[in-house]
Amino acid sequence: MAMHIITEAQAVIARNLGILVLSDGGQPAVSGNRNYFPILTEEQRIRDEAAEQERAHIRQADLNSGLAEWRKISGEWLIAGTNLVEGQRVTVKRRDKSMSTEIVGTVVGETTDGLMAARVGHLVTR
């Protein structure tokens, strides 16, 4: 059966998963793919979770700084943000991190996560 040398961090994950950690030349190891692959899967899940938390933190900081974001609600693209007022100019950030300045139109309600949702408005010229 194949032995897989693992890192100390992977050894902690293995122990948390109830996988027996052996020693191969003083380094932590596990025997067989059946024990090794769950460690890799859990390691990836932990990385993904950390990345998602970082994205959520950045998004919240953007919203707190006054940026808005695009939301597609019932097939319509709306501006979602905090303290939106009809007629105000607001910077709207896309998922690709590009930004545009838009005019807030009619505020139509609140999103499920508590942001105000508004249609895109138009400049009124007289």
Image (cartoon, rainbow, N blue to C red):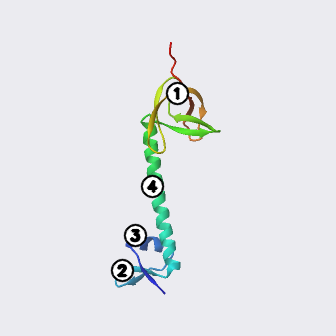
Asked whether 105 or 11 is in front, the reply is 105
Q: Secondary structure at mark 1?
A: strand
- Is the residue 61 above or below the residue 9 in the image? above
Instruction: Return the x and y of residue 63 as percentages of the image width and height.
Output: 46, 38
Q: Residues within 10 Å of mark 2 (few under 14, many from 20)?
A: some
Instruction: Return the x and y of residue 87 as percentages of the image width and height.
Output: 51, 23
- Is the residue 62 above or below the residue 32 in the image? above
Instruction: Report the Cα–Cα distance between label 1 and label 2.
Output: 60 Å
Residue reaching furthest bottom?
1
For badge 2, the amino acid type reads Gln
For badge 4, the amino acid type reads Ala
Instruction: Report the Cα–Cα distance between label 2 and label 4.
Output: 29 Å
Q: Which residue position holds label 3?
A: 9
For badge 1, the amino acid type reads Val
Q: Residue at 59% of width from left, 40% of height from top? A: 72
Q: Residue at 44% of width from left, 43% of height from top? A: 97
Q: Secondary structure at mark 4?
A: helix
Residue reaching furthest top?
126
Instruction: Return the x and y of residue 23 as percentages of the image width and height.
Output: 39, 83
- The quadrant holding residue 120 is top right
Q: Which mark's residue is nearer the viewer, 4 or 1?
A: 1
Q: Earlier in the sequence, mark 1 or mark 2?
A: 2
Q: Earlier in the sequence, mark 3 or mark 4?
A: 3
Q: Which mark's residue is nearer the viewer, 1 or 2?
A: 1
Instruction: Report the Cα–Cα distance between label 4 and label 1.
Output: 31 Å
- Which mark is drawn over residue 104? 1
Asked whether 22 or 1 is in front, the reply is 1
Q: Residues within 10 Å of mark 3 (few under 14, many from 20)?
A: few
- The reply to whether dot 3 and dot 2 touch (C-beta < 8 Å) is no
- Is the residue 33 above or below the residue 55 in the image? below
- Which mark is drawn over residue 27? 2
Q: Which residue position holds label 4?
A: 51
